[in-house]
């Protein structure tokens, strides 16, 4: 059930909270290098005279390293605090890309080592921001709206980031663009870790366990589902390229991706403008069902205008699914592991997206563009089946309420600032 949020409870109310705008902006800028990394690597390699095969290999190495590094760095943040991990990681990641920009692709071993360092040390700013929201915003309903705003902001970043990169390449060169983007990333991370909430945040005491956040059955169920959500989204990217090729107009691909992003923006804004009651796990199942249903019409592959409309429809429930998943992660992350848990979600989603791209390619070659879009529909349906099959464990939050959570339910933001616990139980 949903009700309209009061005017003072919207996104502007969140951004007016002390530190909130700085944390959101710093996180988005800090994530720019990772957000445009695959595109930047491709442009750089091609400018150096390298092949698309080499670009793909470097991107794959970068992606695998990022997938490995995110949960490890997330766990380090939970153990050591944000400034001691986020800023050094951002600097090391940037130095990896600087090494690539300065040495080029003449020595392949060095090029691969550079992108592995850049990926492995990509700072877990995304999970770190979500861990900060409870202490910054206080009330549970504001935290939930911040999660929705976070999902919308991601769509903006993935739209603006490539445009900024293209502008830098046109003004200077792909190598210069790599340097500037990574400098911006370090500055963004610096803006976050120098803020008072980041400096004073401490994870709740955690039980020592080698599995960390992965010892939560509910979190494992969510990660299993989001692997297939990522697979669906990754397959759409490849299928959209094939669709544009079929039409003989490469620009069609850009329009389809823009429509997908626009749909996600509209869906995220609408979702965040309402207050939702009931268990988020049940709501997530409904949202994933709607996401899968909206992926299915893509197999119709009508003309470009109608296809753009279907792409926009396919994007509508993506941001709401992400925003709701953030709440579920928070509910199921074992005490003291929230940053790691959010980082696992990023990793799982990214690995699923990469596999979706890998599966959609052969599907298009064997059975045409329709088969590529069919992979997206199947991925969405399997994501729903995982949620349904694991309903018993997913419906049981992992942690009991903490004193910090009690203060949040009471709406005492001032008390929360001093408590600095990151668990937001419900």
Image (spheres, rainbow, N blue to C red):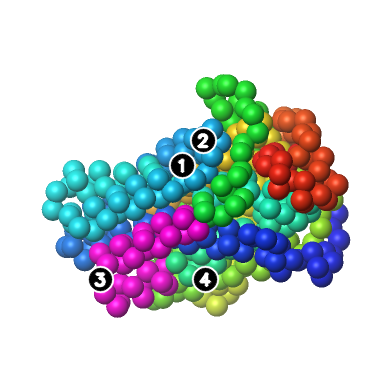
Label drawn at residue 258: 4
Which is closer to the viewer, label 4 or label 2?
2
Question: If you read the primary sequence from the N terminus, does the residue marked by circle 3 or circle 4 appear first?
Answer: 3
Label drawn at residue 85: 1
Question: If you read the primary sequence from the N terminus, does the residue marked by circle 4 or circle 2 appear first?
Answer: 2
In the image, residue 157 sits, relative to residue 95, either above or below, namely: below
The residue closer to the viewer here, 12 or 426, is 12
Which is closer to the viewer, label 1 or label 4?
1
Taking the view exactly as shown, the residue that stands out farthest to the left is 106
Question: If you read the primary sequence from the N terminus, does the residue marked by circle 1 or circle 2 appear first?
Answer: 2
* Magenta-tinted stretch: 162-191
In the image, residue 132 sits, relative to residue 210, either above or below, namely: below
- Check whether the beta carbons of the residues at disc 1 and disc 2 lie within 8 A of each other: yes
Could you tell me how far apart the alpha carbons at marks 3 and 2 are, in whole angstroms? Answer: 38 Å
- Check whether the beta carbons of the residues at disc 1 and disc 4 lie within 8 A of each other: no
User: Quarter of the image containing the C terminus?
Assistant: top right
The residue closer to the viewer here, 10 or 18, is 18
Question: If you read the primary sequence from the N terminus, does the residue marked by circle 3 or circle 2 appear first?
Answer: 2
Pointer 2: what residue?
Answer: 80
From the viewer's perspective, is 418 left or right of 354? right
From the viewer's perspective, is 3 left or right of 175? right
């Amino acid at each position: 059930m949903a009700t309209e949020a009061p005017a003072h409870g919207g996104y502007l109310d969140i951004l007016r909270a002390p530190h909130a705008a700085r944390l959101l902006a710093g996180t988005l800028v800090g994530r720019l290098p990772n957000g445009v990394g695959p595109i930047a690597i491709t442009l750089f390699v091609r400018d150096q005279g390298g092949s698309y095969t080499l670009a793909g290999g470097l991107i794959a190495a970068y992606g695998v390293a990022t997938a490995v590094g995110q949960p490890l760095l997330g766990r380090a943040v939970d153990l050591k605090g944000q400034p001691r991990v986020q800023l050094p990681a951002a600097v090391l990641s940037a130095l990896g890309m600087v090494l690539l920009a300065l040495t080029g692709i003449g020595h392949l071993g060095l090029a691969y080592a550079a992108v592995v360092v850049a990926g492995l040390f990509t700072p877990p700013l995304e999970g770190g921001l979500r861990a900060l929201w409870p202490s910054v915003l206080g009330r549970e309903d504001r935290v939930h709206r911040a999660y929705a705003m976070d999902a919308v902001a991601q769509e903006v970043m993935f739209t603006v980031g490539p445009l900024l990169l293209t502008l830098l390449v046109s003004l200077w060169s792909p190598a210069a663009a790599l340097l500037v983007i990574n400098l911006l990333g370090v500055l963004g991370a610096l803006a976050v870790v120098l803020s008072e909430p980041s400096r004073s945040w401490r994870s709740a005491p955690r039980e020592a366990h080698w599995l960390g956040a992965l010892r939560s059955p509910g979190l494992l169920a969510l990660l299993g589902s989001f692997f297939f959500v990522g697979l669906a989204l990754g397959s759409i990217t490849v299928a959209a390229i094939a669709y544009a090729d079929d039409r003989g107009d490469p620009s069609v691909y850009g329009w389809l991706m823009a429509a997908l992003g626009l749909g996600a923006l509209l869906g995220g804004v609408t979702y965040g403008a309402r207050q939702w009651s009931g268990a988020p796990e049940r709501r997530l199942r409904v949202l994933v069902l709607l996401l899968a249903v909206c992926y299915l019409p893509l197999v119709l592959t009508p003309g470009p205008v109608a296809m753009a409309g279907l792409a926009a429809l396919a994007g509508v429930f993506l941001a709401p699914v992400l925003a709701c998943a953030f709440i579920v992660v928070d509910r199921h992350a074992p005490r003291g592991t929230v940053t790691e848990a959010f980082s696992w979600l990023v990793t799982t989603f990214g690995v699923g997206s990469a596999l979706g791209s890998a599966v959609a390619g052969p599907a298009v070659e064997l059975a045409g563009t329709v088969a590529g879009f069919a992979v997206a529909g199947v991925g969405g349906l399997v994501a729903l089946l995982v949620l349904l099959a694991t309903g018993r464990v997913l419906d049981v939050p992992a942690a009991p309420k903490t004193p910090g959570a009690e203060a949040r339910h009471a709406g005492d933001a001032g008390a929360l600032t001093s408590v600095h616990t990151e668990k937001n139980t419900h």
